[in-house]
Image (cartoon, rainbow, N blue to C red):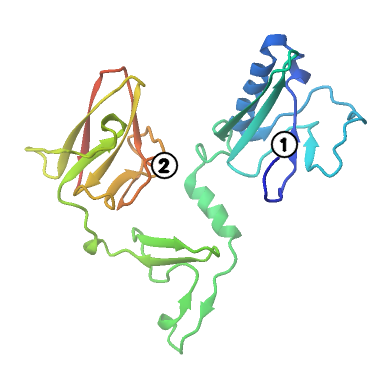
């Protein structure tokens, strides 16, 4: 509402009171529950029993829509807020943010290959610069004609949204010689991992669960913050997520271990 940039879509307005009436002391909490429900589905929930808008509500020039039907959001994440105005003059506002985790439109439950194929189908045709008569000298903004399955590319996106890429020569990558573990359990101060005596390339570390019941961690090579190994998603709880790196990475790109306070976990990192 207070954004400095113009909105592309109207603000959708709904009310939990049309579903469950006022609720007295629980009205604000019920409204927040509806916010959580909406962001987890990435949809605006409809008002029930809405027949006509109050003609005394002045919304002239305000980009909003009072819902009579549910509406799906365009993005994969959304904000929802609820305001509560107490009888005694106490006013409060709460907001929820979340990703779509409940239906088939969400990226968490969608096939990433199919999502990429749909985006690729909507992409504009690639531009081709014909440098001479030999097609091997031509340049294109599309896929690398010489690309093979399994090739890796470093992609950069400039301020104008123009992408450029360069094939990664894995023989030149410095994967690291010694490995460290860092995370919330040691205040992100890298601790050396132990090299396995029986398995070549296996490094072992330990994480002790603190009072919060959850700890985040990353693997770092050669104690260099430019050589961090991390999952492909933030706050990852999956053991089979794709490992990215070595590269500079934000702390949000980390694995999460949950357990009882004081519980110890062994972390194994295998560098082939």
Front residue of this view, candidates 95 and 105:
95
Instruction: Categorize mark 2 by other alpha carbons within 10 Å: few (<14), some (14-19), many (20+).
Output: some
Q: Is residue 65 above or below residue 170?
A: above
Name the residue tied to disc 1. Answer: 71
Image location (x, y in percent) of residue 104: 58, 36
- The residue lying at 46 percent from left, 86 percent from top is 131
Q: Is residue 138 left or right of residue 11?
A: left
Front residue of this view, candidates 9 and 7:
7
Image location (x, y in percent) of residue 216: 33, 33
What is the secondary structure assignment of the residue under circle 2?
loop
Instruction: Categorize mark 1 by other alpha carbons within 10 Å: few (<14), some (14-19), many (20+).
Output: few
Q: What number is the disc on residue 233?
A: 2
- The residue lying at 63 percent from left, 22 percent from top is 32
Q: Is residue 101 above or below residue 210?
A: below
Q: What number is the disc on residue 105?
A: none
Cα separation, mark 1 vs mark 2, equals 28 Å
Q: Quadrant of residue 196?
A: top left
Earlier sequence position, callout 1 versus callout 2:
1
Image location (x, y in percent) of residue 179: 18, 44
Front residue of this view, candidates 57 and 20:
57
Q: Is residue 131 left or right of residue 167?
A: right
Q: How many marks?
A: 2
Image location (x, y in percent) of residue 166: 37, 67
Q: Is residue 118 above or below residue 110?
A: below
What is the secondary structure assignment of the residue under circle 1?
strand
Q: Quadrant of residue 18?
A: top right
């Amino acid at each position: 509402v207070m954004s400095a940039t113009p909105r592309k879509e109207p603000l959708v307005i709904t009310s939990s009171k049309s579903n469950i009436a006022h609720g007295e002391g629980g009205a604000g909490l019920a409204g927040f529950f509806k916010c959580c429900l909406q962001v987890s589905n990435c949809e605006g929930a409809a008002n029930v029993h809405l027949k006509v808008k109050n003609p005394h509500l002045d919304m002239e020039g305000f980009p909003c829509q009072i819902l009579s039907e549910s509406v799906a959001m365009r993005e994969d994440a959304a904000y929802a807020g609820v305001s509560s105005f107490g009888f005694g003059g106490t006013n409060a506002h709460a907001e929820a943010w979340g990703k779509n985790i409940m239906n088939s439109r969400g990226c968490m439950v969608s096939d990433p290959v199919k999502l990429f194929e749909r985006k690729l189908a909507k992409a504009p045709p690639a531009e081709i610069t014909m440098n001479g008569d030999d097609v091997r000298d031509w340049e294109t903004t599309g896929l690398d004609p010489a690309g093979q399955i399994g090739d890796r590319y470093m992609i950069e996106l400039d301020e104008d949204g123009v992408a450029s890429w360069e094939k990664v020569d894995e023989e030149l990558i410095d994967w690291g010689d010694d490995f460290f573990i860092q995370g919330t359990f040691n205040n992100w101060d890298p601790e050396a991992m132990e090299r396995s005596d029986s398995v070549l390339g296996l490094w072992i570390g330990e994480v002790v669960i603190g009072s919060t019941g959850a700890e985040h961690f990353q693997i770092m090579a050669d104690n260099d913050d430019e050589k961090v190994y991390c999952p492909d998603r933030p706050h990852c709880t999956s053991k089979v997520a794709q490992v990215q790196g070595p590269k500079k990475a934000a702390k949000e790109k980390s694995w999460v271990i949950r357990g009882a306070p004081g519980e110890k976990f062994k972390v194994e990192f295998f560098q082939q």
